[in-house]
Image (cartoon, grey):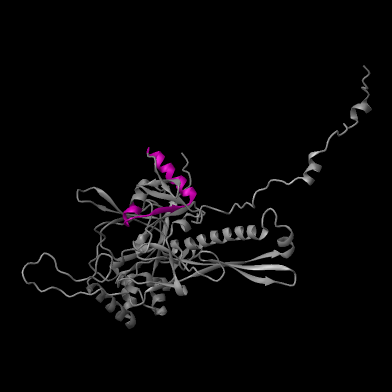
Amino acid sequence: MNLDTSPDAQLEPQRQTSLGTVAARNLATTSKSAPQMQEITSRWLLRMLPWVETKGGTYRVNRRLSYTVGDGRIEFVQDGADVRVIPRELGELALLRGFEDVEVLTAIAGRCAQRDFRAGEVLVERGAPAEQIHLIAHGRIRQTSVGRYGDEIAVAVLADGELFGENALLDPDAQWDHTATAETAGTLLTLSRADFAAVLSAAPHLQAHIRQFSSLPQQRQNRHGEAEIAMSAGHTGEAELPGAFVDYEVNPREYELSIAQTVLRIHTRVADLYNGPMNQTEEQLRLTIEALRERQEHELVNNREFGLLHNAAFKQRIQPHSGPPTPDDLDELLCRRRSTKFFLAHPRTIAAIGRELNARGLYPDHVDVGGQQVPAWRGVPILPCNKIPISKENTSSILAMRTGEENQGVIGLRQTGLPEEYEPGLSVRFMGIDDRAIISYLVTTYYSAAILVPDALGVLENVQIARRHD
């Protein structure tokens, strides 16, 4: 046997004896997927909200007349280390709600004194005279009191934009009914009764406003601040029964449908020649609608006009007791409303909930929602929503809501029967072909959300979701 072992023979490439795969693919029909898209999420909020038909593009929420005023939050401006309250934001105080004299409000704001505090500092003592109101610019403050049996009990946890001690401005005999202790370092502004009285004495319009405010508590109210319906119970004989009627808000809130839209453009050459085996127009439209629905859910959560995070009632916003989302925090969120339908949280927040449960030896239940097993707490499903923002400090929010018109809950708003409707509340309208042979389609969806009564939606704010370093 004669084998050529010379170096030249070893370097000579091997001859191809059959058709290669690269050339063969030119004659083959490949198997392919539809276009994929990472932006698509489960969009649980869109799936779980009951959608109410909104003819005329506007939905009016009629409520019983309420005398509750000024329970909002205050915003501040920061100039280096100096913090100032925005004068108009003082209208969030109950006794200044509706007062619009900017000059007087500016004078009040100018008398607010800045106070920086450190973690662990006691800001006010229970039983001490209350002589000023405290506006929290930044930080967390825990309020505690003494229970019936002498033990210390938690009253509330306050954070940025909240306040305490408002009754001190008008009541010379006011006393602190709690102890306020700083959990973190922060800044607050204080306004003393004496400084407020100095401005009040020189402002006749403010004096008239305060007199009008002082008359409001004389109106009979229920614990929600609504006008009370007079009635009698437990009487005997022919007692004279009180007359009653249900008063309504004079200026109820109206929600107008918002809009999200885009123009989808496709070249006629693509639509004509490259439609097999998949229709290019349909695939382009499918992905465009997916992106539009993602934006719709984002707006339902974050829009300042109607988004759930910005429109939750301030009395329905609570702070975690220790930072991470503990079972106690979830229970407190649950107890503030009846018939909670679901929690909504960022996936990282759900992971933080799991860590806290595991640390306590607890394991969440799982319930079936639309054929999927999801974690639950007290039987209420915890659903993911990556549209809920996470701050740079690794904090986020957890929403809990009751849904449906019949339950006085949270509802989604839309209008169906649109011209050239493609999906409920979404239309795809042909706009023509331009001189560059580009086909255009206008893709539009109309939507909004409404909170029928304040306790339909609650928010656990400033939840710490970062993993703690052990």
Of residues 438 and 380, the one drawn nearer to the viewer in this rendering: 438
Quadrant placement of the N terminus: top right
User: What residue is rendered at 40% in x and 51% in y?
Assistant: 119
Of residues 112 and 383, the one drawn nearer to the viewer in this rendering: 383
- The verdict on residue 345 being magenta is yes
Of residues 146 and 326, the one drawn nearer to the viewer in this rendering: 326
Q: Magenta span covers which residues?
A: 332-361
Position of 195 relative to 178 (above/below): below
Can residue 110 be seen in the rendering of this structure?
A: no
Position of 86 relative to 392 (above/below): below
Can residue 52 be seen in the rendering of this structure?
A: yes
Of residues 225 and 381, the one drawn nearer to the viewer in this rendering: 381
Give the residue at the far top of this rendering.
1
Give the residue at the far bottom of this rendering.
204
Side of 46 where 341 appears, left or right? left
Q: Quadrant of residue 65?
A: bottom left
